[in-house]
Image (cartoon, rainbow, N blue to C red):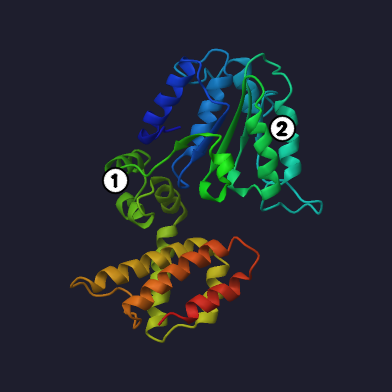
Amino acid sequence: MSIPSWHAELWTRLQARRQRDALPHALLLCGPQGLGKRDFLRRFVRGLLCQHPNDGDACGTCRSCLLLDAGTHPDYVSLSFGLRKDGVQRSDIVVDQIRELSARLATASQFGGWQIASIDPADAMNNAAANALLKTLEEPATQTMLILVADAPWRMPATIRSRCQRIDFQLPSKEASLAWLKSLGVKDAQVALDAAGGNPGLARKWAEEGALTQRQDVRKDLAALASGRGDAMTMSKRWLDDAPEQRLWFAAQAVADEIRARTTTQSAPLSSVLSGEELAAWYDAANRTREALRGPLRGDLMLLELLGRWR
């Protein structure tokens, strides 16, 4: 695994706390998706449970490491989305899961060391689950570690966030991002990084999945609508069927480029007839729609309403 350079300082600080025997009972790993929070989590958990760690990293060969690799370590539990009674995966983390997790953390470690639990995504806990977790955070058992992972920590109650030691993952410099992408052999690294708004993890994912082609398709769709050649209903159905949140990211990005072009001598890429104020409003609406797609409202109607406003 290629360890990103922007993890180095975060890792060093956390290991310094470990050496001082000053690790907190709760960590919150937060920041934009794509910066390797979950890789960092796995590396830290492996090192913490390893019987023969080296500078915080796991040896990979002891019994603890082998059990973790097999997913059967008795002192580590990972909590994510469960299943409803009808077998469908939930879109939130519920109170029964947290109660079960708390009971697990209250038991003694079978290896005589740390008891560790992770919740990912922690920002998907509903209110009842968050309230149940609060008691565990306020009264932690000896040598237990709760690690929360969140792409959007602001969705979590402040009472939860305030009781965790935060580790904030921030966008690295452009130079560091490009160096990492090129070390992995990512083609069109610069284009991918621009498309991902400077996020190297997303840039890698999108380059490997061919999303840069989708980015161009979104721009062509918006240009067609602006010229009167496109059909909003057909387009909304096509977007909904193929990564709609990602398409809305690219759409908002294209509109931002349109706004910037109007302040320079460059030609506007989408040739929209909307005013500057209307473009800004459409940009905001695209981002709101992307968020709303995670909820219960009909995605086809939201996309149709949004695209129907584009000119």
Which quarter of the picture shows residue 27?
Answer: top right
Label ID, residue 226: none
Can residue 203 be seen? yes
The residue at which mark 1 appears reads as: 174
Q: Amino acid at mark 2?
A: Ser
Q: Which residue is mark 2?
A: 102
- Out of 165 and 187, give the one closest to the viewer: 165
Sequence order check: which comes first, mark 1 or mark 2?
Answer: 2
The single residue placed furthest to the bottom in the displayed view is 228
Residue at (34%, 80%) from the top-left corner? Answer: 272
Pick the front one: 30 or 273: 30
For label 1, the SS is: helix
> Residue 70 placed where, x, y %?
66, 27
Residue 100's place in the image compared with 205, above or below, is above
Residue 113 in the image, given as x and y percentages of width and height: 63, 16
Give the SS element for disc 2. Answer: helix
Please identify the quarter of the rendering in which residue 12 is found. top left
Query: Which quadrant of the figure contains the C terminus?
Result: bottom left
Q: Is residue 185 left or right of residue 91?
A: left
Residue, x 48% and y 35% (percent of image)?
166
Q: Measuring 67% from the left and 38% from the top, which residue is drawn there? A: 133
Q: Residues within 10 Å of mark 1 (few under 14, many from 20)?
A: some
Q: Nearer the viewer, residue 18 or 264?
A: 18
| Circle 1 or circle 2, nearest the eye | 2
* Residue located at (38% from left, 64% from top): 253
Crowdedness near tag 2: few (<14), some (14–19) or many (≥20) residues, C-alpha within 10 Å: many
